[in-house]
Amino acid sequence: MKQELIGKLNTYITGQILKRPDKTLNPNEPLISGGLIDSFSLVDLAMFVEQTWGAKLADTELNAQTFDTLNQLADLIESRL
Amino acid sequence: MTLTQIFIFTALGLVAGGFYKRVNRGWLLFLASVLAVFWLQPASLIRNLPFVLPAASLGLATAVWALTLPRETKISRQDWWAAGILGGLILLVSATRFIEPLSDLLAVRPPAVDFAAIFVLVLALFAGLLFWLVRGRMLALYLSIMLIVAILIVIKSPPLAQAASGALRSLSGQDPALASPLDFGWLGFSYIAFRLIHVLRDRAAGRLPAVSLRDFVTYIVFFPALTSGPIDRVERFTPQLQTDFLLDSDQLLTAGRRLITGLFMKFVLADALAFFALNAVNAWQVQSAGWMWLLLLAFSFRIFFDFAGYTHIAIGLGMLFGVVLPENFDQPYLKQNLTAFWNSWHMTLTQWVRSYYFNPVARWLRAHKIPILLVILFGQLTTMGLIGLWHGITWNFITWGFWHGAGLFIHNQWTAFSKTRPFSLSPSITVPLGIIATFAFVTIGWVWFALPQPADAARVFSVLVGMK
């Protein structure tokens, strides 16, 4: 389940946000603190997560302290399914 | 905070640090924070205001606690104790007018005890009514947010602050013609307001944990973070008051390092730079571009050392009492772009504005299929405009906010452009170039921050570019 989540998140982030669909992200790579995802893309990512899995990410959770990597985001989504 | 106040807080932390097996840390921090609100409040020419404003901060904290307490949570014995002690301490502050050495707690002569008693009664009645009649009601939560924002607007807007000062002068039998916006200095209210709004908004969203009155009041007016932040979150702050803590040598060393760094930054570097940092007077005295750039650079470093220094002091003091406050600065002047700068300058403020303004607004606009370019432009300009307004409702802070909003928009578009056309320049060129460009952009922006009058800023810019 988690690998599937990471796979879908990776496809969305590399294709829609980074515009590099050929790239594969390391599941432990810092996305927010590493500057890969900016605040606008973060809002889009939260909406994608909500539409795809129905897991709500609150406005106060869109920061590197709540999740910063694909692994952490997948854990967060899994805990809300 | 003055040096004396910092030394007294440090001494209290050192003495209490070894006795937490006998002294309850939660109660100690509650007592110290409540008294410190009065002690740190500066003097005012309006009668009783240096007493009324701190008491109102405590009253607002209590009212918001009563309004946001979950419906299923009952008021505990500890909460009643905290309410009683809070009322008692406010009365005690007014009673110090009869005890000569203690009357120095307030910057002015404390008010009459009957005045304080009426004040405490009104606050208690207000909090009680909120608790029994409208606790947790959405309308009450949002009206409270609006009330806090309205108070912020009055304090931050010079004409409104002047009008409020005039009204208060009339109420206290003083001459309203002498009213000044400077009369209305409500210590720490910018930070108190943002903590209260965070709590009210999270309660409306159903995300607020139950917190005792004692810990809630301590969170709102925690003395190390009262004057200059940082803005912590209640669910991060209050659990730290529940854990066992005894000051050991490692913590002492870390806290000491933070305190010494902060004191050096604030009272040596920032205060020395203040002698020739750009201000409304020297903006008209300097004639050459080189000297004007020097004044501006001095301001740029002064504001950083002053604010980052205060943050070190707040974090160091917090550590002495077993509370780890969030970081507020992360080498902002060494960042390679403006987005990274704003992720490392006054971090708790930007995080707050993102959580409670930018994210909900951007989400709403995206959900309504507004074109992304418009969302980015609107989001950046209004977010930074809001951060500007938080510093003061004057043209210069709004211009400063828009300057940064425009800079962030340009950086965002540049990043999007360079994703599709990667450059092959070496990092040994792009990294220093990015740092210098970001620092120059931020430093030029400080002209508006430093000078309230448009004519002053226009004069400085014309000298900076060699046109005068």
Image: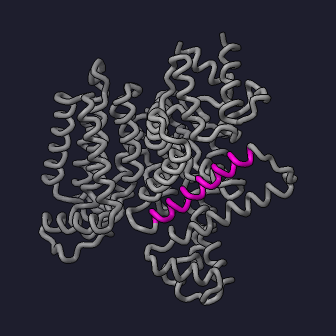
Residue B193 drawn at (x, y percent): 36, 47
Seen at 50% across and 42% down, the residue is B354
Q: Quadrant of the C terminus of chain B?
A: bottom right
The one of B69 and B49 positioned closer to us in this rendering: B69
Seen at 56% across and 58% down, the residue is B406
Identify the image quadrant of residue B97: bottom left
Seen at 62% across and 24% down, the residue is A73
Residue B96 drawn at (x, y percent): 25, 56
Of helix, strand and loop, which mostly describes the magenta segment?
helix
Identify the image quadrant of residue A1: top right
Q: Which residues are magenta?
A: B397-419
| Residue B400 lies within the magenta run | yes
* Above or below B394: residue B376: above
For residue B59, side relative to residue A81 (left or right): left
* Above or below B49: residue B320: above
For residue B433, side relative to residue B296 (left or right): right
The one of B124 and A19 positioned closer to us in this rendering: A19
Residue B21 drawn at (x, y percent): 50, 30
| Residue B24 lies within the magenta run | no
Asked whether the viewer can see residue B257, the reply is: no
Seen at 35% across and 30% down, the residue is B203
Asked whether the viewer can see residue B203, the reply is: yes
